[in-house]
Image: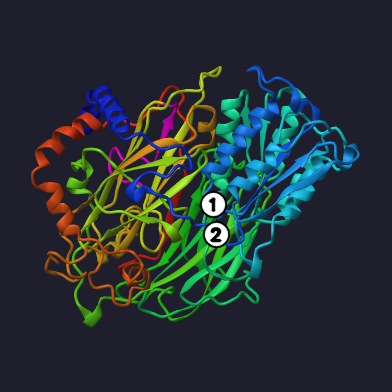
Amino acid sequence: MRAGRRCRAAVAAIGAALLVLAAAPPPAAGAEPAGRGARAPRTAEGSGLVLVLDSSASMAEDDGTGRSRMESARQAVGTVVDALPDGHPTGLRVHGAGRSPGCTDTRAVLPVRPLDRAGLKDAVRGVRPQGGSPVGLALTEAARDLPAPSGGRLATRTVLLVSDGEDTCGAPRPCEVAARLAGADAGLRVDTVGFQVEGAAREELECVAGAGNGRYYDAPDADALARQLQRSAGLSADGYRLRGARVTGTPGPGDAPPLAPGQYLDTIGPGERRHYTVALDARSTVTFSATAVPQPGTAVGADDGLRTRIVRGADGVCGSGSARFGQDEGAAPLTSAVTRVPTARAAGSCDAAGRYRLVVEREGTADADAARWPLELTHAVEEPPAGGATPARPQPGYGAGADAVLPAGDPTPVAGGTGFNDAEEIAAGAWRDTLLPSQTLWYKVPVGWGQQLRYDVEFADEASTGGGSPVRSYGATQVYTPARVPVGSGAAGFRRTTAYDGRPAVLEMGTVPVAWANRREHRPEVVPVHSTGGFYIAVTLGARAAEIARDTGIGVVLRVSVLGDALAGPQRDAPALGGRDAGAGDNRGDSAAARDSAPGAGAGWSGAATAAAAGGGVLAAAALAVLLRRRAAVTGSGGHPPGARTDSSSTRRSA
């Protein structure tokens, strides 16, 4: 019946989505939306961008509009400069300006430094196309233009090559240069934009991007050139903000480094295993997460992914988890997590205090991305309820959450974070953001004991580029616990992915209510939902969307509810908190939840007050609006490979 209601509402839902987005149109990439949605400068230390602009003689030719290709390129670069965040380190290099003999003709016009908009525009205005195309040499020098991150930090550093032709020198070969650069630096990517190219020139630029851990963007005209440059630069400026103490896992058990509770950074290559040691007690629930951060949109296979295991002794596995991309369109952040839950009688072989190992393995096919991936690890510990209190019963069902009425009305602008560490905190309500192709945006919603998270993601109707054959991409979402465990989908009708072809598409997701005893359940979408704090929502747009939409970014709306009253603690018969913060219940002994609820962590909002405001005079209107808003997720003939798949198992025996 639920699916039937959605089908009957599909046409009305499209109209409602269009009305919402028309009333508050999404900003272009890099634009500054009003109010809460304004993007504050947040450049990660060590990140940077260097534009490599083709200034060979062919760039003086007419681009079909009466202007030269160079004139269109100047205008496009100006658009990119205006869209970049303040202070983002940016530089400009050219090749083929006639200043040096043919195959040595490349120079840094503007060094990489905190963004100087006026200086960069002046620099590109002074470029005159007249030389050759030593692309390989220009890429080599561009990588040297980017300052190396200090202290072993990992950050996104991008070489963005704009060209209307192929290399004319032959050595060094551009594809080989790109592969060498990407292999030597896990944070470096080489993106390419082909301006009115075809044949061998396009193949070479595609090869450079593929080998360089980046993405190729096709620009058949001046408008597309500006759009694709903005997309690449936006991904560079808003790369995942990694955080943690550096650690180096070992390929085998011997000499594996110890991990205390906290957060760490490592890297992992294709087919590698990384071993770490941990000391566990006999009473606490312990969760480990491993988040791989490949460059967004780089080539991956559907079965590429991560596996995490907790191992006792030589080969006794005390829990395992895995995550797969589930699509071959392009990489996005991927998290695998594993939890050790002591049994109720503490009689299992994995219950004893002692030394265990965390093993992270990167799995993939032979032709998978060859670059090393930054790896962010967390180790969180949760002690049993204080004072030996009896926990409330588990909450394994979705109940009213499956058909909950979500907030209606015009959404408020918001700027999602780049990852777990800077996820934008939002409360119940309707929120509007803009996604770039290949991008994942992150949000954090405080959820208390006894409450459940329920939300919809609406991908907007977008004007098409009007290209040839229809292109299909995807939209995806995932919800994570405060300990970064992917929850997945369990209720009938909940889905993590939908096909996206530029027309409106909707995903519905949620969790069961938070209960301490859920950790002793068996269903994978129930077990992780056992502690309070900031639950993370990640929203991803597929890489092929760059071939669909005429706008730089694609509008997305989140409609979020936190259902139920927050309880004072995990114990049986705990009273409701009333006006207290939803996520501020009894988190003593819970390192993950306490971190999210700590002062300055951004976890405070009044769930009861928000629910009251949303549920008073607008409840009847919201009930009507939800029928106008919901529709079945777009599938289409043939469908699209599903998004990231996750699976986990832990020691949950109750014997």
Q: Residue furthest right?
A: 101
Q: Residues within 10 Å of mark 2 (few under 14, many from 20)?
A: many
Q: Which residue is mark 1?
A: 239
Could you say where residue 519 lies in the image, as x and y percent from the top left? 31, 64
Q: Which residue is mark 2?
A: 44
Specify few, some or many for label 1: CA neighbours under 10 Å numbering under 14, 14-19, or 20 or more: many
What is the quadrant of the C terminus in the image?
A: bottom left
Instruction: Name which residue lies at 60% across and 76% down.
Output: 257
Is 484 or 458 nearer to us in this picture? 458
Taking the image as drawn, is residue 210 in sight?
no
Marks 1,2: beta carbons within 8 A = yes
- Where residue 216 sits in the image (x, y, percent)? 64, 35
Mark 2 lies on a secondary structure that is loop
Looking at the rendered structure, the kind of residue marked 2 is Ala
Of badges 1 and 2, the one in the foreground is 2
Q: In which quadrant of the rendered image does the N terminus lie?
A: top left
In the displayed structure, 317 sits above or below 542; it is below
Total numbered labels:
2
The residues colored magenta run 489-502
The Cα atoms of the two marked residues, 1 and 2, are separated by 8 Å
Q: Which residue is drawn at the image coordinates 50% and 41% (left, top)?
A: 326
* Residue 247 location (% of width, % of height): 60, 71
